[in-house]
Image: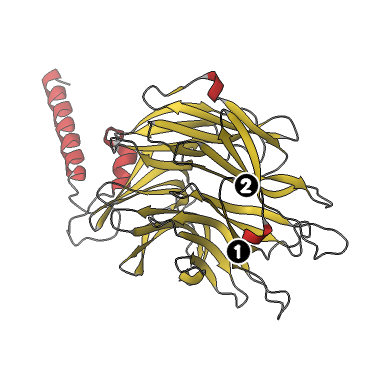
Amino acid sequence: MNISILQKIKKNITIFLLFFQLFIACGCGDFGNGNNSGSETVIPIERWEYEYPAYNKWKKEKILEISGGGLLIPHLKAAYDIYNRLHITYFESSDQIYYKLKYKLIDMSSLLVLSQDQISDIITIDNCNDLCFSLDSNANPIVTYQGGTIRECGDEKQSDVMINALENENWNEYTAAIGFVERNPVIKDGLAGHSFSMAIDSQDIIHISYQFFYEGCDSMNFQYPDLNYVAIENKIDYDDSTVEKIEANNYDDGNIQNNVGYHNKILIDNNDNPYVFYYAVLENNTRGLRFASKTTGNWELSWIETGCEIGHIDAAFCYKDNSIGVTYYVTNELSTNKTNFLKLAIWKNDSWDIIIIDDSSKCGNYSSINFDSNSNIWIAYYEQKSHSGYDLNNLKIAIQESDSWNKYVISSGEIGMYNYLFFDNSLKPFICSYSEPEKTYYLLSQ
């Protein structure tokens, strides 16, 4: 074949491919959806992120590697302070039975651990169903976990909610709630924990919401927890008189059995009032996202949404306009049988608005919510699978811009667990996220 003709053919093919890519990128045409109306098709943002990585402007830096394995690994929690430091707590295996709860402090300007003295083992425990972490007004770390006394049980386990605070360079442990009960005349057992949450108010009072099981060793009754609350001043040890029932069973009058408090998240408003969000199944089988508030001295209970089964919950308070944002992972919507998607409830002007944030894939677990300086909501969350079952394992973010939402995959493949979204002192967004196969905690930033 004549070389000039061959060159013309190659040139025409190149021009055609460039034109076709431009045609697709501009959203012109409508391919593969059976719609031949000729109307404009907008390419979803998610496709841009998968197909055009140059649009991904988030950089990813390794900040922590975790060794060992086991059911408790890693249960990561993080908190950012006003001194531009990142505090991290997590579990690492100690041997085949025990686990070490560890703490690390990272300088955000260099991403280096500040000093060897500030890398510490907090405590060694044998089991733990949850882990919470916060900072007091002086940026001192306080950790809440399941530990304490080992109860009488066929499967002996530590069954109290414990607080550990870093004070004068030493970790000091306090008992926040105990699982002991005398209801069972044979085995004196019980469990405080399984799901619990902690927040610290402006006066450094520690607020804890936690599940309480009357018979923590009895699997037949393990499905009917109460939801309790305790406020602790000056880090004093457990005082039974301070425990309050948010929502409870009633074994003395009618044998009412509720199943409440799962995935509970406690939040403090600008007046230091506590709010608790949790998944509940009441005796009449009504289930969904439950809301408890204490602004008048008594706990007031209400539903945010019913007819759904819920996993992970997160919440944030906006001090600029006193609004609240609650993200929740819907594992099953009973009326539609739709599963595994992310919802948001916004409290504003004395009512809840409910929004589906993302149901484009099976996603929404490990959500972390925060408000930026313009009161817009940012949500980081895990995208696990496509609806057809294809593994994705991506870290996604949803950003509110006025009344619209933009969603992006900001890191793809084997990342997106234990997310923590925050803004630094210069209002720059960051996300901490864990990769299970790599056993690595990453810091992502724009």
Relative side of 46 to 78, left or right: left
Task: Please state the horizontal and vertical placement of residue 155, each as a whole percent of the image.
Answer: 81, 49
In front of the other: 133 or 141: 141
| Quadrant hosting residue 246 | bottom right
- Tags 2 and 1 in contact by the CB under 8 Å rule? no
Relative side of 326 to 436, left or right: left
Q: Going 60% across and 63% down the picture, which residue do you hit? A: 244
Task: Tell me the tag on residue 236.
Answer: 2
Label 1 Cα neighbours within 10 Å, binned few <14 / some 14-19 / many ≥20: some
Residue that lies at the very extreme toward the right in this rendered image: 186
In front of the other: 181 or 376: 181
The three-letter code of the residue at mark 2 reads: Ile
Task: Please state the horizontal and vertical placement of residue 130, each as a whole percent of the image.
Answer: 61, 47
Mark-to-mark CA distance, 2 and 1: 17 Å
Task: Please state the horizontal and vertical placement of residue 369, each as a whole percent of the image.
Answer: 40, 49
The three-letter code of the residue at mark 1 reads: Glu
Q: Earlier in the sequence, mark 2 or mark 1?
A: 2
Is disc 2 placed on a helix, strand or loop?
loop
Label 2 Cα neighbours within 10 Å, binned few <14 / some 14-19 / many ≥20: few
